[in-house]
Image (spheres, coloured by chain):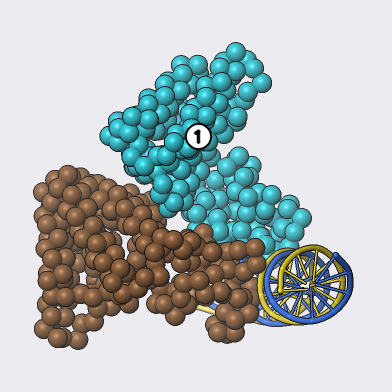
Chain colours: A brown, B cyan, C yellow, D blue
Amino acid sequence: MTVYESIKRSIIHGEFPPKMRLTEEYLANKLQTSRTPIREALKQLESEGLTVSMKRGVRVRHFTKKDIQQIYDLRTLLEGYAAAQAAIHRTENDLENIRLANESYDQAIDSYIKNGETTIEDILEINHQFHNAVIQASQNQHVYSHISKVVVVPLIFRSFYWFNEEQLKHSLDAHKTLLKAIEEQDMERARVAMHEHIYHGRDEVLKQIDNIDAQYSDGEEIQ
Amino acid sequence: MTVYESIKRSIIHGEFPPKMRLTEEYLANKLQTSRTPIREALKQLESEGLTVSMKRGVRVRHFTKKDIQQIYDLRTLLEGYAAAQAAIHRTENDLENIRLANESYDQAIDSYIKNGETTIEDILEINHQFHNAVIQASQNQHVYSHISKVVVVPLIFRSFYWFNEEQLKHSLDAHKTLLKAIEEQDMERARVAMHEHIYHGRDEVLKQIDNIDAQYSDGEEIQ
DNA sequence: CCTGCATTCATTGTATACAAACAGAAATCA
DNA sequence: TGATTTCTGTTTGTATACAATGAATGCAGG
C-alpha cells in the first residue's frame, strides 16, 4: 500500500477524523518513512478534496451536511449519465460483467441476511463493483475519475450506516431495474433508475447524519 | 507563480507538447528550483489528468479526438447542471455578476472585431469569467472543481482555434440567452442554452482538429 | 487588563546526497 | 547471427540537513 493510499484509507475509516491536523512528521513516523513521500501524498489528497491546507499545514476536510447534499447531487448527475450511456453503448461483454456483479450482490445480501460470513464492508465492496461495471459500460473513460471523487466522501460517514433488511432488498431491486433497462437499451429508464437509487442512498445517509450527530450543521465552515 | 501553475501553463500553452517527457531535473533547471517542489507539482498534475506517469517518469498527456468528445460531453452535463441550478438559486448579487461579465464580453468582442487592443486570449479569459459567474450562482461549491478539470483540456488545442466574427457573435447570443433564462429562473431553458452553447464550441474544436491535424485519431493511445 | 511588539518554538519549504531501479549498450555464448 | 546476460549511465525514490516562516508565548507600556 502506498503512502497515499494509506492516508486516504485512514481518512475514510475515520482514524483521522475531520479537522484533524496532519503534520508531516507525525505521518512520516506513523508510516515509517520520511517526509518527502508524505508531502507528495498530501498534495494529491488535497487536489482530490479530502484535505484542506491552510497557511501552515493541512487538515482533514470536514464536510457539512450541505456538502454531502451537493456531492450527492453531482453523483446522481454523473452516475445517471453513465447509466444512460451504458444503455446505449454497452457491449455484450459489459452486459455480462454487470450481470455477474449483480449476482454477486444478490448472493452477498442473501448471505448477510442469513447471518453468513458476509460483512457490511463486503456488501459495500460488491455494490461498488456493480456501479463500476455500469460506468465501464458507458464507454466514457473520463467519467470514472469524476465519479470516484464523489463516491469517496460519503464513505467517511460509513460508521453511521445502518442497513436493515428492507433497505438492502430495496437496493437490490434498484440494481435489477437498472440492469434490465441497460439490457433493453432504454436510456431514459436507466438514468431514472440510477437517479432513484442514488437519491435513496442520499436520503438514508442524510437521515443518519441528522440523527446521530449535530456537528454537521451548515453553520460550521471548513477551516 | 507556483511551480505547479508554471508547469500547467506550459502544458496548456503547448510549450510542453503532448507525449513530451518531463524529467525532474530538466524542470528543476528550467524553473530554477530543486527537484522536491517539482515532484509535488507533478503529482498534482497527474491527479488532474494533465500528465501520465509510466514505470519511469512522467509525460504530458496526449488527448485523442475521442477524449475530447467525451470530455466535452461531461462539460456539457456539468455546466448544464450548473446553469439549471443557477436559474433556481441565484441571488441578486450573482445576477449582477453575470450581467457584468456579460457586458465585458460584449465589449471585448466589439473591440476585437473593430481591431481594438483586445486579443483572443483576453476574450477567452472574459468568457471564462462569465462561465464562472454562472457556476458561482449555482450555489454548489463542489461543481466548480469538476468543471475546471474538463475546461482545461480543450485549451491545449487553443492554437487551433479560429474565431471568425460570426462565431463570436453566436457565442455572445448564447450568453445573452442564458442570462435571460437565469434572470427569469427558467431552469430548463438555462440548461438547454448552456448545452447548445457548449456543443457548439465542441463542434468547432473538433472540426479544427480534423482539419489541421490527423495525429489525434482514436487509434493512438496515451502512452 | 488589554494591546502591541519581540522572542522563541514548532513546522513547513527547499536543497542535496545517496540508494535503488530501470533502460539501453555491450559482451558473451550457443 | 541471435538471444541472453551483464554492465553502465541516467533518472527516480527516499532520507536528511538546513533555511524560512507562521504561531504561540511572554513582556512592556498604556
Residue A120 placement (x, y as % from top left): 24, 78
- Comparing B158 with B84, the one in front is B84
Residue A87 placement (x, y as % from top left): 19, 48
Q: Label 1: how many residues lie within 10 Å, few (<14), some (14-19) or many (20+)?
A: some
Instruction: Name the quadrant of the C terminus of chain A.
Output: bottom right
Q: Name which quarter of the figure residue A114 lies in.
A: bottom left
Q: Name which quarter of the figure residue A105 lies in.
A: bottom left
The residue at the point 62 percent across, 45 percent down is B9
Q: Is residue B142 left or right of residue B119?
A: left
Q: Which residue is mark 1?
A: B97
Q: Is residue A52 left or right of residue A212?
A: right
Q: Is residue B148 visible?
A: yes
The residue at the point 11 percent across, 63 percent down is A173
Q: Is residue A211 above or below residue B113?
A: below
Residue A35 placement (x, y as % from top left): 64, 76
Type of amino acid under label 1: Asn
Q: Name which quarter of the figure residue B167 lies in.
A: top left
- Comparing A102 with B29, the one in front is A102
